[in-house]
Image (tube, coloured by chain):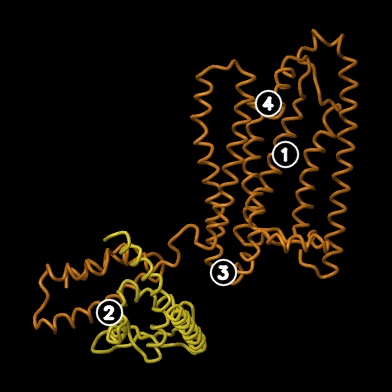
Chain colours: A orange, B yellow
Amino acid sequence: MEALERYLEAVGRHLRGGRREDIVAELRANLEAQLDDKQAELGRPLTTKEAEDWLKQLGAPLQMAARYQAQRYLIGPEMFPIYWLVMERALGWAAAIYAIVSLVLLATETPNAQSVVDALVRLPGVLLWVAAWVTLIFALIEYGAARDPQKWQGMLEHAACFPKAEFTARQRSGLHGKRKRTLAHAVAEAVFGFLFLVWLLLIPQHPWLMMGPGAAVWKASPFALAPVWMTFYWWVVAAHALQLVWVCVELARGTWQKKHGLRHAVVKAIELIPINVLLYAPGQVLLVLRDPARDGARLGATLSGWNEGLHKAVLVIAILVAAQIVWTLVNLVWRRGRGEAE
Amino acid sequence: MTLMENLFENLRLELRRGCLTLAVLLQLREEHYGYTLRKALAARGMEIDENTLYPLLRRLEAQGLLTSEWREEEKRNKRFYRLSAEGAPVLELLLAEWQSLNAAIETIRQQGKGE
């Protein structure tokens, strides 16, 4: 029958994956049997109109095909409460941070009505970005959960924070230090990691984001940062981006609960790179004069003193970070030696 | 449809959802293909739409509760389903759960009448 063939073809168009032909063949067998029964009851073939009415009762081809798809939602009912909680908090924080940044911007520039309107107009875009990131992260988690439900079931049980009574009991017994990382914690890390990365990337264009009103004072001062700071900056961005990717991968793979001594050590090791960039800056020069010809004689000695002090500070930081790496690695080896999961 | 009718319809669908799986597993202690299964269930008072039943069979098979095979019958290839060896104990557990729920609802209902 032509109408049935058209219906099956339309269902097939909306099916995905290798099961398409199998599903259509099965549906054809069932519907043809049903059609035979209908025609036997009537004692004649169905008219085109009757056949179309019958097929309409089965539901639109798209709906029929959708019923065969394993996952028809981005975020399922089990995950939704956690998603909503994180979304509320992320949007709240993003709005608060945006408000503070906008107020600082308005305070440092000449305030006018247009600036205020511009800031307000940009707000929905910022919030949409945050919402999109939170949704993307949760959709990845849901996808992982759909593929391996058993593995994720246990993890989801730990997704929400402990009930207060249990938490207090754990605190009393000193167990809180061993508490596993929750899903909410891992998602918050990813969302705020992303916001932090955006903030980092905006700093070269808008130094006030880091220095506040001090940016104007710095701009007016005779000193400037040496070019080595740009190399340092890009290494910091890269280290942070790597950490963000790492958190996202953990979320997608469902491994956010594990303790991450190794990740901590790797991130710390990567943090050593920008510190070393500063430590081995050519001539140990971290600050320069904007106009050496004008200020060289007057401020040359001050500049040397500052560069020397800064170099020592960077050296101390490098030693501390190296010590942290060693400490993390020792802990990691010790835990593995005791058979604790990383 | 009024608001109350709409609400009732949603609650009815929610109530039926789990029962459908139980009915399908019970009926598939005997082998059926999709259409005859639908007819057999309808004959026993359990009407199920095609677009619910046929995908449900696939899902139950993917979960290991059913087995299936393609076979020719009346000059047509059809996919026959049957309760799997793994599905049988699950069905027993589900039946026990169903009976326990049923008994609980009945007790609560009788209690309400007595008060």
- Tell me the residue at 77%/63% (across/down): A169
Q: In the image shown, does B5 or A221 lie closer to the viewer?
A: B5
Question: From mark 1 to mark 3, how far is it between C-alphas?
Answer: 35 Å
Residue B75 falls in image quadrant: bottom left
Query: Which percent across, then down, holds residue A22?
Result: 35, 75
Question: From mark 2 to mark 4, how far is it between C-alphas?
Answer: 68 Å
Specify few, some or many for label 4: CA neighbours under 10 Å numbering under 14, 14-19, or 20 or more. Answer: some
Q: Which mark is residue A207?
A: 4
Asked if both marks, 4 and 1, belong to the same chain, the answer given is yes
The residue marked by circle 2 belongs to what chain? A
Q: Earlier in the sequence, mark 2 or mark 4?
A: 2
Q: Are marks 1 and 2 in contact (CB under 8 Å)?
A: no
The answer to whether residue A155 is left or right of residue A9 is right
Determine the secondary structure under disc 3. loop
**Three-letter code for the amino acid on which mark 2 is drawn:** Asn
Question: From mark 1 to mark 2, how far is it between C-alphas?
Answer: 62 Å
Closer to us: mark 4 or mark 1?
4
Question: From mark 4 to mark 1, how far is it between C-alphas?
Answer: 16 Å
- Residue of label 1: A236
Query: Which percent across, then down, holds residue B55?
Result: 37, 73
As drawn, A194 above or below B34: above
- Residue of label 3: A148
Q: Which mark is residue A107?
A: none
Closer to us: mark 1 or mark 2?
2
The answer to whether residue A139 is left or right of residue B30 is right
**Three-letter code for the amino acid on which mark 3 is drawn:** Asp
Query: Which percent across, then down, holds residue B59?
Result: 43, 75
Q: In the image shown, does A36 or B93 lie closer to the viewer?
A: B93
- Tell me the residue at 40%/91% (across/down): B29
- Residue of label 2: A30
Query: Which percent across, then down, holds residue A332?
Result: 83, 60
